[in-house]
Amino acid sequence: MGTRQRITKVAKSLFHNRSYADVGIKEICDKAEIQKGSFYHFFSSKRDLVLAVIEEFAQDWAHGFVHEAFDPKLPPMERIDYLIDAAYFWQKAAKDLEGHMPGCLFGNLALEISTQDDVLRAKLTAVFLKAKERFRCTLDEAVECGKIKPLDTQRTAEAMLAYLEGMILIAKASNDPETIYRLGSALKSIRIELDA
Amino acid sequence: MGTRQRITKVAKSLFHNRSYADVGIKEICDKAEIQKGSFYHFFSSKRDLVLAVIEEFAQDWAHGFVHEAFDPKLPPMERIDYLIDAAYFWQKAAKDLEGHMPGCLFGNLALEISTQDDVLRAKLTAVFLKAKERFRCTLDEAVECGKIKPLDTQRTAEAMLAYLEGMILIAKASNDPETIYRLGSALKSIRIELDA
DNA sequence: ATTATAGTTGACCGGACGGTCAAGTCAAGT
DNA sequence: ACTTGACTTGACCGTCCGGTCAACTATAAT
């Protein structure tokens, strides 16, 4: 594996499990077994790195379990159940490994740096926008084939994303992945009617 | 105002608008117009301070707009509308002042430090627990007087809290308080049925 | 007046931080 | 054989970090 990939791999894990401010470049370099100069050959700054990490993680995510969950072969509303399952198993596995639920990297970073860096914030909103679109398409499909009554799919999609993030936040705060199962069933019940 | 109060007041504002790791003791001391030695007379560590800040903020919150919103004179479900309003105005006002939505201090801290300090995490879960109880009592009351159909008030309360936090997260990520209004109407629609 | 205590000062500590840089390695292109 | 340019090394920079400390002052009880 190339040096650059080793850096982002280590950084992804550290940023996800701790926080942006808490993880230093030195530690990243040590864990990636490189020197600081090498780091600055690939990234012009720590901020540049986290930008790359967000991008990569969004890719991993989109092609990973999100892609699985939003399987077009599944009935639309079942995809949402699948998503809850995937979120649960991921967080559960991470906790078993590291001792703590890492939560959602995007949510974590959003709350940490949104007030401090508008470029990073914009990057994160773009990630959230894509996730929202995934929900919206699913809802549109469900409405189209009559599985659910018509509703404001745009807003409902946004609300579902918010609920997903909120669930993970609460679960992380109690370090209890079961929270995701306990609260997951409400995700499908979220509705925002048209013309509110 | 006493020195200790000045410290916590400054710290509350800084931690809320930035993050725990990003705010240094030096800066807190400067803004509170005291010396570092004075700080360590009142607090044994930065961690000790943030513990006090969480406690104080939870008090402010409980006696402030949460107390207003959960007014027992209001019909139970209207309290939730009121809560959305209060959250919106608070975040809006903060954004107009500082340029950025600070979000929820407890949510921010929870995501930042949950994986790193179990004592602080426990403190935050205690705050969330109280908020959840507020929701649960409101739901119980609404069920009792027939305003809503019976449901799992325990879990639904937790889900509502999660949704509230998630909404604020998404709103902060887009630095747009209007998000709270756009998504707020779904809060009351959240339901978790009994015997799931 | 003396003493005890609470509060305050500002210099100081070691170490970590993000970031720089001159020097060198090495493989591919000519 | 020589040059180029990507990559790596490790020492180094100034600054800031959380935290310590001995000395000083203000207050209030005896």
Image (cartoon, coloured by chain):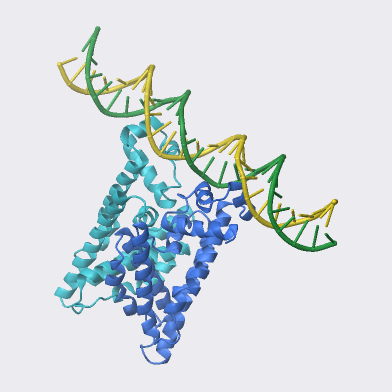
Chain colours: A cyan, B blue, C yellow, D green
Q: Quadrant of residue A105?
A: bottom left
Residue B123 in the figure: left or right of residue A122 = right
Q: Residue at x 41, y 86 (%)?
A: B74
Q: Quadrant of the C terminus of chain B?
A: bottom left
Residue D16, horizontal then vertical, whole percent: 48, 41
Give the side of residue B102 with respect to residue B183, left or right: right
Among the 4 quarters of the image, the one containing residue A88: bottom left
Q: Residue at x 32, y 36 (%)?
A: A44
* Residue B77 visible in rendering: yes
Whole-percent x, y for residue B56 in the image: 54, 65
Residue at the spot x=47%, y=73% of the render? B64
Q: Is residue A126 left or right of residue B72?
A: left
* In-front residue for pair A97/B47: B47
Q: How many marks?
A: 0
Front-most of residues B187 and B74:
B74
Residue B163's place in the image compared with B110, above or below, is: below
Which residue is situated farthest in the bottom direction here? B145
Say which quarter of the image contains residue B175: bottom left
Residue A160 spot, x, y in % from top left = 29, 69
Relative to residue D5, is residue B155 depicted above or below?
below
Residue A35 percent location from the top left of the image = 41, 31
The N terminus of chain B lies in quadrant? bottom right
Please determine whether, in this image, residue A193 is positioned above or below residue B123. below
